[in-house]
Amino acid sequence: MLIMPRKSALKPKKYVTDRRGQKIAVVLAIADYKKILADIEELESIRAFDAAKASGEESIPFSEATQEIERSRK
């Protein structure tokens, strides 16, 4: 699978600066912030999937995994 990099649509328009005028923070719209969080969560899921696949361990169905987790909690 080939994933093409895309230019960011998120361009901060406001910065917080220190006394010397150095940019130290960004002011984002809530919608942009939520999009960034969702993208990070999706990337973490992709990385976890890739790591699990590369481990070579045997996979089990999700329903079986949840049953094992429930049994271990008792």
Image (spheres, grey):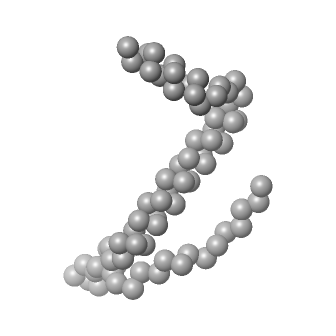
Q: From where the camera sits, is residue 46 visible? A: yes
Q: Locate residue 24 relative to residue 68 in the image: left or right.
A: left
Task: Say above or below: 25 vs 45.
Answer: below
Could you tell me residue 2's position as x and y percent?
Answer: 76, 60
Report the front residue among 64 and 33: 64
Q: Residue at x 61, y 76 (%)?
A: 7
Q: Residue at x 28, y 80 (%)?
A: 17
Task: Say above or below: 42 vs 31.
Answer: above
Q: Locate residue 21 relative to residue 44 in the image: left or right.
A: left
- Quarter of the picture containing the C terminus is top left
Quarter assignment of residue 9: bottom right
Could you tell me residue 14's position as x and y percent?
Answer: 34, 84
Report the front residue among 62 and 4: 62
Report the front residue among 23 and 33: 33
Could you tell me residue 3's position as x and y percent?
Answer: 71, 62
- Quarter of the picture containing the N terminus is bottom right
Report the front residue among 63 and 59: 63
